[in-house]
Image: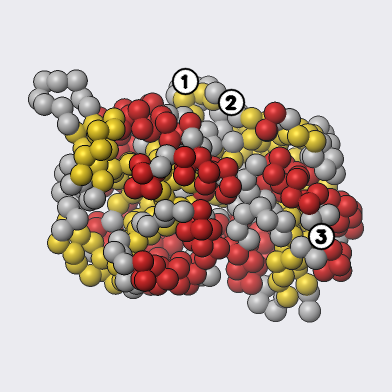
Amino acid sequence: MGLAKRIIPCLDVDRGRVVKGVRFVEIRDAGDPVEIARRYDQQGADEITFLDITASSDDRETMVHVVEQVASEVFIPLTVGGGIRALDDVRRMLNAGADKVSINTAAIARPEFVREAAERFGNQCIVVAIDAKAVHQAGETPRWEIFTHGGRKPTGIDAVEWARRMSAYGAGEILLTSMDRDGTKQGFNLDLTRAISEAVSIPVIASGGVGTLDHLADGILLGKADAVLAASIFHFAEYTIEQAKRHLRARGIEVRL
Amino acid sequence: MTHIAIIDYGMGNLRSVAKAFEHVAPKARVSVTQDRRDILQADRVVFPGQGSIRDCIRELAHWDLLGVVRAAALGKPFLGLCLGPQALLTFSEENGGVDCLNVLPGRVVWFGELREPETGERLKVPHMGWNQVRQAGDHPLWRDIPQDSRFYFVHSYYLKPEEPALIAGQTRYGFDFASAVARDNIFAVQFHPEKSAQAGLRLLANFVDWNP
């Protein structure tokens, strides 16, 4: 009896289609976002996250329509990330039917943006996405740094410090991606996940690297994540959300089934 | 045709609430409105809210809707959502202390530093995600919703009604708090039924059928 840990399928959307890349390079088409969102909802997904990976701003309008369509038939929380740079972007996505927006690069460019967005729209709808990579050598104290541009560009910002700062600025939740693991199917970076989750009082979603159902459970039990996000294991029908939840339950984790 | 008015005072996105009502009551007229007459003439009123309580009360005053909300809460089926039930109580601790509408006696209190009593594990705030609601008794809005069903929550402050009789449902997060309150024609929930899949849609459908 209590709060369930969440499973959040993530849909990378490019020009209105769901795609999945491995380490941000090789892109495979995985289908129609509305259809996939509907299927995940039926399987018992706790939330759905859309990541707009469209490069051109002309195509952003497509994403607004995707959110509108999904929101009129799928009644669970929806998060949209990618290209959220101004208060107007937040407003547009919320008006289209998103419940939360995920802010990444814009927060690094101007941290005050997070504070302004949280004050204007409420902490509950501001997720700060953190892409982190290990920068310590073997044998050293673990240290992770924020990277941008799909993991290519270091920022010099310490990931744990950044998470604390974003929480203080009013983020309602943190979406943490391990860039070392993303797309590898080797499991979450559990040390990183636990370090961030213990550093802040707001919920942390673990992302990056899920290949098996045990990886999801480990993220929660060992990484102390409040929610786990995965893409490819669900898109390519390796597992259903329901199978994933049954597995978590078998490992003693409270889920919504 | 039944007219359901969703009060729009600039606090949060009401599209989801409207869409969910359109989904469960395709024959009803669903309006998202700040028009006083529209709200007062509606058959049913929904009082949603998101964000901070200070802004909520300020915006209601700005749109001259404080009296309208009180009047609607007196007479017709009235559903409060999320920040809505908080605004209906007497006082909230948020933003250094804010006087609310005092439609129902009680206070709104911060979760603070929370731990699971049995394990000592720290609990995150906001309370975010799917949690169970223990129905306090039979109420038409709980019809066909199994006991202990899960609904979607996201909040850092909780309802502390003065009279136990006001509690229609309770949820456990470190301790038991009131996640639904009700009196006469008022039913108000801390969670988001419009985002709570089947159980949430059932509750909204029950509200549409409710004749207190």
Instruction: Tell me the amino acid under the disc marked 3.
Output: Pro
Say which element carries label 3: loop
First reached walking from the N terminus: tag 2 or tag 1: 2
First reached walking from the N terminus: tag 3 or tag 1: 3
* Mark 2 nearby-residue class (10 Å; few <14, some 14–19, many ≥20): few
With respect to residue B84, does A189 lie above or below? above
Say which mark, if any, is on residue A157: none
With respect to residue A241, does B125 lie above or below? above
Identify residue for label 1.
B120
Residue at 58 percent of width and 63 percent of height = B16
Residue at 47 percent of width and 20 percent of height = B120
Say which element carries label 1: loop
Discs 3, 2: same chain: yes
First reached walking from the N terminus: tag 3 or tag 2: 3
Distance from the alpha carbon under mark 3 to that under mark 1:
42 Å
Residue at 66 percent of width and 59 percent of height = B203
Instruction: Tell me the amino acid under the disc marked 2.
Output: Gly
In this rendered view, identify the residue nearer to me: B47 or B203: B47
Identify residue for label 2.
B112
In this rendered view, identify the residue nearer to me: A236 or B145: A236
Tag 2 subunit: B
Residue A161: percent from left, percent from top: 35, 28
Tag 1 subunit: B
Residue at 17 percent of width and 31 percent of height = A135
Say which mark, if any, is on residue B77: 3
Q: Are marks 3 and 1 in contact (CB under 8 Å)?
A: no
Residue A20: percent from left, percent from top: 23, 61
Distance from the alpha carbon under mark 2 to that under mark 1:
15 Å
Instruction: Tell me the amino acid under the disc marked 1.
Output: Gly
In this rendered view, identify the residue nearer to me: B100 or B187: B100
Residue B76: percent from left, percent from top: 86, 60
